[in-house]
Structure formats: structure tokens, C-alpha cells
Amino acid sequence: MFASAVIQKGLNPPDDLVAWFERTGGALPCEISGESLKFFAAGLPVARLCVAPDRFPDLAASIQRRELRLPDMTRAFVQPGEARIYLQLPERTEEFQLLIRPDADAIGEEALSIDRLRLSTDELSVRGSSGSSRAPGWRGPAAGLADLESRTLRPLRLPDAARADLVLRFVSLAAMLDFAPATETLAAFQSGYRREDAAALGRKFLNRQFKRLLCGARPSRGFLLMEEIGMLDWFLPELRAGLGLTQNRYHKYDVFYHCIYTCDAVPEPDLKMRLSALFHDLGKVDTRRVLPNGEATFHNHEVIGAKHTERIMRRFGFEPDLLKKVRFLVRHHMFHYTAEWTDRAVRRFTKKTPPDMLEDLIRLRLADRKGSGKRTALPQAIKDLMRHIARIRAEEAELKTRDLKINGHRLMELGMTPGRPMGDLLRDLLEAVKAGQLPNESDALEAEARRRMGALAALAELTATPTGADAKN
């Protein structure tokens, strides 16, 4: 049942998490909770491992005494009747640790009717192998299995009031899993949500839920759910302002849908890239102008969008370094390369764009194309720019005379007169180094220079024109 209901839904553990269990040999006597599905769906190598104190009292006690010494463990704690370990692989970026806050998120973490997906470490470690002693299976309620198969999300019990914090947790969880809310759950949130309650939520809480939503399996699911509930105009009014604003023949969707689908088009749960994709066209709301032919234009929308980006990220308390990078990507995502760009123009472009940011700009342009609903490949102009940059970098990577460990000043010290012969000598030394005939080391180059200068001097003496007494003889 685990294979049919979970793996087919794309909710199976990531390969690197499975590899971790295989390396440890299933040493931990614990089980994976259904809560882990949200991490699996988002592609994060994170799992919540459950340890029943009555079954494994020594391990549970070690966790409670904080004596568990495993480098891969990021968080572990005990509550009545159960010990929990939140496992995160150390080689993955630390930004995802912010998605795991069990101590602060006790309410809402169990918002699935899938209250437990029991799968032992031994079963997981031999997933796909014929050596398993028993088949992995579903060990939760039948209603939970039905919700899993239909990708339906519902609280274990519907709250008496649609508290804003529970609603936002539910929204972020829906995005992480890419599950749709149950009909009665959505109706309860729509009727019970109050904007004044949401206004009281703290910035740290909002920041954490925003990150969870963005790093989910489908961020657009969360934003669309917010709009259905009626909270998007409070949470992100700059995004909602694009709803219904048509674009041009190159875009299938309005500004709002284009932004959220561009965010979905970033394949990895990369927070920087997902933020950039979501914000990249927010400036179109302010710059939209409709031409007589009905087409809309958005001149300099990237400049206005960068200003929106900074205000939003400050409002949510994002880190300054992340803000700087996202703002840069939004501000420069509209670069246009043409065949008229000279090598000098391309060098100016790459000089103001660090190599890693250039790669991110191209990733953003690709997501932008996919989010248009009409095109999925990079524009030909971007491909041409990439080839132009590659050619220039290949040329710049080649050794030049200025890279030699000897120069004209040293040749003058050795007695050579400046002029064409000096340039010829340096070029000959460069070719010898590039051919592997000489190492680019000062001693070797100086010795070869002395030898060649001696040969030149001897040749000059032999070919000198006879004068004076020599001519008479």
C-alpha cells in the first residue's frame, strides 16, 4: 500500500535520505511519521522519526537528556507518549532548517488526516529490494489513506474558529504537499477568517510560513488558496494587484497568474530563485500602458519591481544578503542581447554581473518563459549571449605575455634594448610555455631568455656591415 498510495503520488523519501538510512544500516529503532510527507513532496531530505518511549525507552531517554550524538540530527525532543527526531541531511543548504520548527509549531503540524504513516527504518533501508522481511504498508486510519490517494488535506478536527495562524499553516502545508483542501475545510476558513486577527501575527511567524510555502511542491497552490480564503490582499497585496491585468500576445496569463506559475517553474526548492520568480514582474502593475492595438506595455517594470521586492522582503524580515540577491535578479532580469553587442559590451555586462548571479539570471529567464504559458525554452538571443560569453572566457583563459613570469623590465635589466626584438622574444617564450616546452617559472624563462639573447647578439655580430680598416682588408 505504501508503494501504490505514496510513491505514485511523488511522496516517497528523496534518494539521498534513503541513502542515509542505508549507510546507517537502520540503526535507529524508530518509524517515519506521516508529517514527513510534506518534506518529501517538496523534495527536501527531511523526515520526522517517531520513537515510542514504551517500546524504546533507552533511546527516548537519551533524546530527553540531550545525549543523542548523531551529526545528522538537527532537532530532537520528547512529548508525552512519543519522542520525535527531526532529521536533516547536513550537506543540504541550511535555509531549510527554518522550515523545521517543531517546538514553535506544535499546533498545525498534525493538520493532516494522515496522522501516521508507519514505516520502519529497516523497511525503508531495503526499499526496492527483495530482501525485506515484510512489505511496507499503511498503518493509519482508512480515512487518511483515502485522503492520501485523492491528495486531500483536512485538519484532524475542524477548529471552532478559523484562527489566522492555523489558516496560514494550513495554506503553507497545502503548498508543500500540493494537496487540495477538503470542501468543508475551505468553506470553514472562508467564513471564519478575519483580517484583523491576521494583522496580529508576528513577523517571524509570517516569515517562516512564507518560506515553507515558497519551498513547497507547488507554491501557486498556496497563493491560490489564500485568494479563495480572502487573505491574499492582506498577505501580499502587491501580488494580488496583478489579478485580472492582461499582458500581451507573448503571455497566456495575467500578471498574477504569470508570477505564481513562474515561481512554480523553478524546479528546485531554492528560496532565492523562488522569491525572484514570484516578484520579477510585480512592477508591471504600476507601469502597464495599453496601446491602441490593445497590447499592453510595461516599460521599466523591472526597476519598479526591484523597489517592491525590497519593501516586501523588509516587511517579512528576510535576511539582508538574501534581499540584496533577489533585488538584483528582479532588477536585471530584462536584459536584452542582440547581435550588435561587441566583445566590449559583453565584458561590461559580465563585469557587473557575477558568474553565479549570471547563472541565476538565466535560470530566472527560463522560469519566466515557462510561466508565460506559451513558451518553455530559452530565447535564442539568450543562447547566443551564452555562446558569446563562453567564447570570450575561453579567449581570456588563454595565457598571454603579461601572464609570463618574466617581462620587458627584466629583459632590459639583462641588457636587452626595448623594441621589436624584445616583443618577438616574449611571444616566443609564451608559445614555448603554451606548448609545454618551458615551465612558466622565472628561473627557466630567464635562462631561456639569456640563451636567445646570446644567440641574437652572435647573429648580429656575424651580419654586421664591415666598416673602416675591416672594409679595406
Image (cartoon, rainbow, N blue to C red):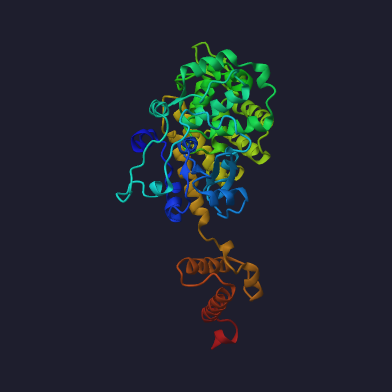
* Residue 132 can be seen, yes or no: yes
Q: Which residue lies at the image location 62% right of the left edge and 36% below the top edge?
A: 328
Does 375 sit left or right of 88 as displayed?
left
Residue furthest to the bottom in view is 473
Tell me how many marks there are. 0
**Residue 184, above or below 125:** above
**Where in the figure is residue 80, as x and y percent of width and height?**
58, 39
| Nearer the observer, 427 or 348 | 348
**Where in the figure is residue 339, as x and y percent of width and height?**
47, 37
| Nearer the observer, 185 or 441 | 185
**Residue 369, above or below 270:** above
| Nearer the observer, 249 or 395 | 249
Does 74 sit left or right of 12 as displayed?
right
Q: Which residue lies at the image location 54% right of the left edge and 20% below the top edge?
A: 158
* Residue 354 can be seen, yes or no: no
**Where in the figure is residue 3, as x and y percent of width and height?**
34, 38
Residue furthest to the left in view is 130
**Where in the figure is residue 276, as x and y percent of width and height?**
57, 33
Query: In the rendered image, which quarter contains the C terminus?
Result: bottom right
| Nearer the observer, 130 or 399 | 130
**Residue 275 lies in what quarter of the image?**
top right
**Residue 70 lies in what quarter of the image?**
bottom right
Query: In the rendered image, which quarter contains the N terminus?
Result: top left
Residue furthest to the top in view is 292
**Residue 39, above or below 199:** below
